[in-house]
RNA sequence: GCGGUUGUGGUGAAGUGGUUAACACAUCGGCUUGUGGCGCCGACAUUCGUGGGUUCGAUUCCCAUCAGUCGCCCCA
């Protein structure tokens, strides 16, 4: 028997409603912030990620899915979204567009070759946003507000936004030098991982979980203290606008991020949920003013974020998020071979009229048909057998009230539509069982038959 | 890449070095030709993730491997 590859998962119909609902919210909020969807290939030239994300990052040095294709080219399944979007921005010369600040969002699969654990898969989904063409701190603040607004729209409230600045290239270099100098004598007292980081990526020593409480690290210089004048001004601007928008955040001076392309603002959103386990960062992002130029484009600033959608899903589950329900308006029960032609005709008429409808294909007994109708969460069942055919009638039963009526069979569709419009029994026919709220807010899309 | 832990039917699970692998739920069929309940009757694992080893004999012990799960590193 075949089984799915390690670290992948099948998203089955019982759960896809949640994802559709989540994605709809993402798209709605994105529209409010005027970010437009971009879809770039899942596959890119390997070199793009080496140059974009950074040769020495863990992500590129040990987590990418690389392969050589039949044309002997080296390809990589994208481990993140920013590099591909930046490539597309440059390749399509969007910097020359009439709209000078280009704002994109994307939703799609990313791939990293890691050991799976809670909230971490080898194929996982991200929702990300990127804005190119302005170095204004207003844009940094907008991006953070955008991320927070998505969470708010999803009713995920128990989160903490952490921000920091690592400054522009000049500030970064100055800081890194100072840090290396500071740690030089005592690096031997830190943990093994830190000693490796010292050589590879000294910035990361700052948020080491093992050593973070040592005097050495507590007193270590912080990036924020090494910002040059313009970097300092930029960060102050970001803070100013966050405050003016009423966005809650904490400045975490130890926050540094693992990707090389970041400059200035870096931020993370953490959810305080035990259901997330160790992976509680649901969103990360920051500014990357040197990325576009390092990929061969014009000198163009940018800023963005990305959400891990599986982690968002975990967060949603802990607040009892339901998503779009699976339901049927009509389940048609045909009794007897002779009635099947009429049945198919009625079924088709209902479907074309906008009613979600189905029928028993297995000639089950009544008992079995009713069970199916229940499993499929059907609002109405209609029974059509010999007796009905003889009189041109059909029995229709409202599952929400258990009331059954016998009507002219040509009235089946009209009857159901009329009943669905009638607010009396249980609101909409979407089958949603939460009576307090609504059915997710989008039943108007199912053919105009909902009335919640 | 490293470490812990788990792996028995559709599901939840019991179990033992010895030949019929409990039990419950679900599902299917019947009692009951067309109204879902209840009840009763019956069906449903040539096999205990996979491969190898120890043994007269392995689902049980050992090794490997695969997968799940949790953690480290890192990240979403």
Image (tube, coloured by chain):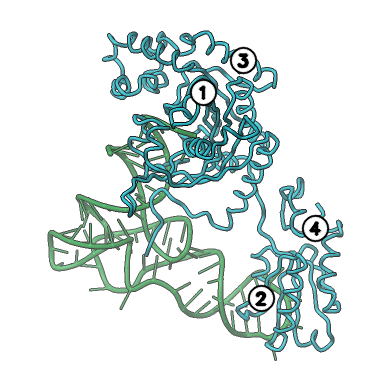
Chain colours: A cyan, B green
Q: Residue at x 76, y 70 (%)?
A: A350
Label 2, label 1: how far apart the Cα atoms are: 61 Å
Chain on which label 3 sits: A
Tell me whether the residue at label 4 lies in contact with that at label 1, contact meaning CB atoms closer than 8 angstroms.
Answer: no
Where in the figure is residue A375, as x and y percent of width and height? 64, 65
Q: Which mark is residue A367?
A: 2
Q: Residue at x 71, y 79 (%)?
A: A344
Label 3 belongs to which residue? Answer: A237
Label 4, label 1: how far apart the Cα atoms are: 45 Å
Which of disc 1 and disc 2 is earlier in sequence? 1
**10 Å neighbourhood of mark 2: few (<14), some, or many (≥20)?**
few
Label 2, label 3: how far apart the Cα atoms are: 68 Å
Which of disc 3 and disc 2 is earlier in sequence? 3
Which of disc 4 and disc 2 is earlier in sequence? 2
Q: Compared with residue B71, is residue A202 higher up or lower down, i.e. above or below?
A: above
Which of disc 1 and disc 4 is earlier in sequence? 1
Q: Which mark is residue A266?
A: 1
The residue closer to the viewer here, A339 or A59, is A59
Label 4 belongs to which residue? Answer: A448
Where in the figure is residue A357, as x and y percent of width and height? 71, 68
Q: Residue at x 62, y 79 (%)?
A: A364
């Amino acid at each position: 028997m075949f089984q799915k590859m390690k670290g992948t998962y099948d998203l089955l119909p019982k759960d896809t409603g949640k994802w559709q609902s989540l994605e709809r919210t993402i798209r709605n909020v994105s529209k409010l912030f005027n970010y437009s969807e971009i879809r770039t290939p899942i596959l890119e030239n390997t070199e793009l990620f080496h140059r974009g994300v950074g040769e020495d990052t863990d992500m590129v040095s040990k987590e990418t899915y690389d392969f050589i294709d039949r044309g002997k080219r080296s390809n990589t399944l994208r481990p993140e979204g920013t590099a591909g979007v930046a490539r597309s921005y440059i390749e399509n010369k969007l910097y020359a567009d009439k709209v000078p600040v280009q704002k994109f969002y994307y939703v799609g699969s990313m791939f990293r070759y890691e050991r799976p654990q809670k909230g971490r898969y080898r194929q996982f989904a991200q929702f990300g946003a990127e804005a190119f063409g302005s170095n204004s701190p207003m844009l940094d603040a907008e991006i953070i507000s955008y991320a927070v607004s998505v969470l708010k729209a999803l009713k995920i409230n128990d989160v903490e936004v952490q921000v920091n600045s690592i400054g522009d290239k000049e500030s970064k270099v100055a800081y890194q030098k100072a840090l290396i100098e500071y740690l030089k004598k005592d690096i031997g007292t830190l943990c093994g991982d830190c000693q490796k980081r010292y050589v590879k990526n000294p910035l990361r020593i700052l948020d080491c979980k093992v050593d973070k409480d040592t005097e050495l690290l507590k007193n270590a210089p912080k990036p924020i203290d090494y910002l040059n004048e313009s970097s300092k001004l930029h960060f102050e601007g970001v803070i100013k606008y966050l405050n003016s928008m009423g966005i809650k955040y904490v400045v975490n001076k130890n926050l540094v991020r693992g990707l090389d392309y970041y400059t200035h603002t870096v931020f993370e959103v953490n959810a305080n949920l035990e259901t997330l386990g160790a992976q509680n960062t649901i969103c990360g992002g920051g500014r990357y003013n040197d990325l576009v130029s390092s990929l061969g484009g014009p000198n163009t600033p940018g800023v963005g974020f990305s959400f891990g959608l599986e982690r968002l899903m975990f967060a949603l589950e802990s607040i009892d998020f339901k998503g779009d329900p699976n339901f049927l308006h009509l389940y048609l029960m045909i009794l007897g071979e002779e009635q099947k032609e009429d049945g198919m005709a009625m079924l088709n008429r209902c479907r074309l009229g906008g009613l979600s409808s189905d029928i028993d294909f297995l000639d089950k007994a009544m008992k079995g048909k009713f069970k199916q109708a229940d499993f499929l969460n059907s609002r109405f069942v209609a029974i059509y057998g010999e007796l009905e055919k003889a009189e041109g009638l059909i029995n229709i039963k409202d599952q929400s009230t258990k009331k059954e009526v016998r009507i002219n069979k040509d009235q089946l569709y009209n009857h159901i539509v009329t009943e669905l419009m009638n607010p009396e029994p249980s609101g909409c026919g979407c089958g949603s069982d939460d009576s307090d709220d609504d059915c997710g807010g989008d039943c108007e899309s199912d053919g105009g038959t909902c009335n919640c």
